[in-house]
Image (cartoon, rainbow, N blue to C red):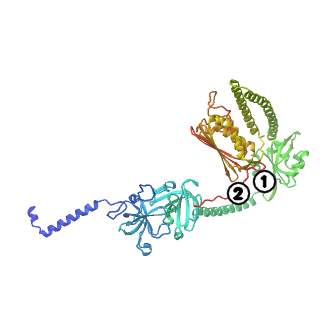
Amino acid sequence: TRASLSLVPKRVAWSLLALALGGLLAQTSTACPVTDDSLQPGPAEPIADIRIDEDGDRVPDRMGDTVTVAGRATAGQGRLTVPVPEIAAIQDSTAGIHVLLPGGSGVERGDGVEQGDSVRIRGVVDQAYGLTRLQGLDYQVLDAPPRVPRPLPLTVSSAVGERHEGRLARVEGHVLSKGSNDGGDFLILTDERKDTSPQLTVFVANRHEGRVQFDAFEKGDKIEVTGVLDQHDFEAPYTDYYQIEPRTQADLVQVGGVPAYLQTILLVLAGGGLIAVVAVFVLRNAVRRRTQELAQSRARFRRLAEATLEGIALHEADGKIIDANMALADMVGTDRDELIERNVAEVLPEATVDTAQDVNGNAEVPTEAEIVQKDGGTIPVEIEEREVTVGDETVHVRAVRDISKRKEWEDEILLAKQEAEQMAELKSNLLNNMSHEFRTPITNITGYAELIMDEASGPPEKFAAQIRKSGKRLSETLQSVLDLAQIEAGTLDVLVREVAVANVVREVVDQHDQKIDEEVLTVEVDVTDNFTLKTDRTLLYRIFNNLIHNAIKFTEEGAIGVEVNSLDAGLQIIVWDTGVGIAPEFQPHLFDPFKQESEGIDREYEGTGLGLSLTKRIVDILGGTIEVESTKEEGSVFTIELPSLDSAGKPVVVSGERAASR
């Protein structure tokens, strides 16, 4: 072998060695991996690195630096629906970014960046309207097969923000609104069709309105948008306005339903088809009616009439009965054949002949009458009449239904109503008597207790004070029970007049001065003296009194507060405290009568559990609303909104427009 090698010329040997080394290098080059988003080797930085904002000022830390990036074009130059034609978007495996390409519009020259191109760009990092982008200095489109990165599937909520800014995304959402401004057309997308949900704008600048349009979409439609995520805020901190930029009309797709314009077309086609079907059906029926005899029509009618429990009679315009069913014969107490040829008026008793004549007038409202049976008895009935066409003849159809059971129920209901009215009257009298019988001794007890307090000292004075306190507690309990009874009976009167709210608040606070001093509480009152409201002063006083009383009772130390704010057609009342608060599990039962968070003989706080229940019902009577926010061991906030009432006790409606624009 060595001898044979020596026979090979040196030039040939060197050539073979060069070929072998070339093949080895080619294999080595082929085995080297290439990046997923760029086919150009060199010092290109990951896009995510130049977007880093470690100090959290919403400005990239590399702002103003000259950097080189490489990736795939997710949107070619001039293809994004923005006003500036030089803008393109590229993306690598880490992030995406908008690029303002140098040298004017490459699309117009024919050498611009197209979607899917592998691009290497050198430029300066800057920011416009909150959008981080690259101000291109030069770029190179590599000779490689085009490929567009797969869109990132997102919801509207996840697309809003800077996390995915510059990336190609596919977002699904509901159209909340549709409109246009000086810059172009837009759709507002949300996840849940609510104004409070995160919003993402689909924007198309005026220069693209012929290429990408929103005509096929309406408010409420569910659509899928593919495009590059963008931001366009006018003021720092650039957190209010986020948008997605489609590239072509194909990036906008209807989801889960038929587009509105297709619905219109389908409805028109369906309507035309329905008209055609109806026309064919009418023509076939006309031919069938001409070939059928009257007897066949009567036979079909009889089968239908016999299947109903109502009495059915067909009669001519002069009243002669030409057919009837067995139900009518049973009502009259005779055979069906005996009804034929009789006049329909003969079936009715003489006392209701006038009623029968009214029925003949084709009245739309059923008429009540009485049918005389063959044995002389009568039954109450309800009669209804219509005109129908049988063959070529017009006949009258009379439906007679037995209402004996209904009359019995009406009598029972009337009797029950009378008994209920009597019971309501007895209840009202009882409440009035109770009010008198209880108040007189309670007044005497508290009065004598106050006299003893004025003249005695030491233990007798303390005993008298306790008697007076118990008497007032009993009086308040009695008043609450009577008020609740009046509300439930619907006998509580509402006297509407102009009320100075500040005076009512001061009266209530002064009423509780002694208790406030005993508890050493701080009271904060924020109410303007000129606040007035057309409402019932007594009921408004009860609302303030109940809420302030509760705030004092459940606040052992700290503060309570009263705040009154003006509304368009009423006012807002806020009563707060720093007391024990209300457990979350009890809050749904807070306004139930006789309900207390601590119950039983050893409960921590006294009371009947009627205060908040009465407050809720009084607020309802005055046409208002009441809400509560409370945290255990931190306190409670009660918010009431009351409208101004007219003389009839109805809320006053104030018209107006509230608009919000971006």
Disc assigned to residue 180:
none
**Residue most extreme to the bottom:** 109
Element assignment for label 1: helix
Q: Does residue 379 lie above or below 652 as drawn?
A: above
Element assignment for label 2: loop
Q: Quadrant of the C terminus?
A: bottom right
Instruction: Locate residue 475: give its quadrant.
Output: top right
| Identity of the residue drawn at 66% across and 59% down | 657
Q: For the residue marked with disc 1, what is the amino acid?
A: Ala
Q: For the residue marked with disc 2, what is the amino acid?
A: Ser
| Identity of the residue drawn at 67% across and 51% down | 566
Circle 2 is placed at which residue position?
A: 655
As drawn, is 290 to the left or to the right of 222? right
Circle 1 is placed at which residue position?
A: 295
Task: Choose between 609 and 277: the one closer to the eye.
Answer: 609
Q: Is residue 334 visible?
A: no
